[in-house]
Image: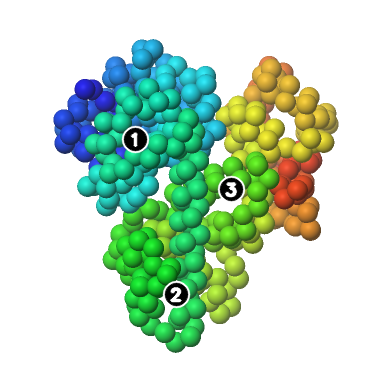
Amino acid sequence: MLIGFAGIGRMGRPMARNLVAAGYRVLGHDPALDRMPDGVMPVADAAALAEAPISISMLPDAVTTRDLVLGALSGAGADHVHVVMGTVGPQVVRELAAGGPVAIVDAPVSGSVQLAETAAISTMVGGHPDHVERVRPVLAAMTSAQFLTGPVGSGSVAKLAVNAVLGVLSHGVAEGILIAECGGLDPAVFYEVLRGSAAGAPYVGYKEQAFLDPDAAGVAAPVSLIRKDMGLALDLARGHGLGLPASEVAFAVLDDAVAAGLGEQDMARVLTALRRRTDEGDEPMTENGVEATIRSLEDARYDAVVRGDIAAFVELAHPDLTYTHSNGSVDTLDSYREKLESGYYDYHRIDHPIDRIVVEGDTALVIGEMHADITAGGTRKALANRALAVWVRVDGTWRLLAYQPTVLPEGSGAR
């Protein structure tokens, strides 16, 4: 059988090799690669993947996954099944299943690159039973266990929940090592105790070298990846009014690690980030947990309007939203949504550097700038504004209550 595979990266490379080893013919597409793994047939145009009856994506984010399915696979046959194996969140795969050109199964994976080499990773599989049954032999060639979780999107929910546990567990191990060190205990001795204790989960065992000798251990799962997944998990939780304090704190420390240039290092580098927080004379490298949450929400709401995901923006907004524009016009949530849906506002690019975030109780002020390329009422224009956003916490969930831009004068960054 012919299989199309998009995204031959850190995890995708061994997965594609395992498909070849199992006897499948594999078409591989990845513009970042000069050379495909042995046995994988390279295709320069992702549209060629539509020739296969089954295709797979192992892509880093929702945008590239959406572009692949809605663009490159638009010419696939009606019986084509696409398996989303990257972690992009349940909302995206459900949208693609509802409105895309092909059948969708979501099957994100759990495990390290080393485990992927021997097809020892697991996958959480969501989809229509007929579609799942078609792709199960393909998944079995790349994974040691396939957990059937329910309809489309359920696999992604399971993956986010698993990685939230891993993020908090990594944070807990790092704090345990710091406690041992400050009490004069050798970290290696403590880790031996930890492995044999009630907290000695399998993950704790195989991450020992990553925590104790990270330079020698290599990278199994980078900080940036687990941060992305925990951000998606927190977005899902917030949308249902859930407060997850442990995940919020773990996410904030992952932010610290990224800010310190450790984003492409192994996720065990949260220990490095915590050490830097507590080094004598050091200040925390980024925000506290609430400020990190607000920063991620600002990212999410701007990203939603750029990619045209109006439902995602509305989910983040307060019902009494006051949205002021730089020309002085004011929208309510309903009127702004209608203008987005009609295409009156079409955002092509938004940069939104944040100067500071001020949190007082259940109110957060975001002070910064907003630079954008936008088509408004059929006219293309560039925006350069100072910006103030107001977020309020209602029943444990932060919502955007107000937005106020002020046009920057000429010469101060306006483009």
Q: Quadrant of residue 379?
A: top right
Say which quadrant the N terminus sits in. Answer: top left
Q: Relative to residue 47, is residue 397 depicted above or below?
A: below
Residue behind mark 3: 234
Q: Position of residue 218 (x, y in %)?
A: 30, 59
Q: Secondary structure at mark 3?
A: helix
* CB contact under 8 Å: marks 1 and 3: no
Residue behind mark 2: 177
Which badge, 1 or 2, is on the more N-terminal residue? 1
Q: Secondary structure at mark 1?
A: loop
Question: What distance separates the C-alpha of mark 1 from that of mark 2?
Answer: 36 Å
Q: Residue at 75%, 52% (x, y): give it.
A: 364
Q: Residue at 20%, 31% (x, y): give it.
A: 40
Which badge, 3 or 2, is on the more N-terminal residue? 2
**In the displayed structure image, the side of residue 80 where residue 16 appears, left or right:** left
For badge 1, the amino acid type reads Gly
Q: Quadrant of residue 107?
A: top left
**In the displayed structure image, the side of residue 187 where residue 376 appears, left or right:** right
Q: Quadrant of residue 370?
A: top right
Front-lying residue, 97 or 292: 97
Question: What distance separates the C-alpha of mark 3 from that of mark 2?
Answer: 26 Å
Q: Residue at 68%, 45% (x, y): give it.
A: 241
Q: Position of residue 151 (x, y in %)?
A: 48, 30
Taking the image as drawn, is residue 397 in sight? Answer: yes
Number of the front mark, 1 or 3: 3
Q: Position of residue 194 (x, y in %)?
A: 39, 73
Query: How many neighbours does mark 2 have within 10 angstroms: few (below 14), some (14-19), or many (20 or more)?
Result: many
From this viewpoint, which residue is outermost toward the bottom? 184
For badge 2, the amino acid type reads Ile
For badge 3, the amino acid type reads Leu
Question: What distance separates the C-alpha of mark 1 from that of mark 3?
Answer: 26 Å
Residue behind mark 1: 7
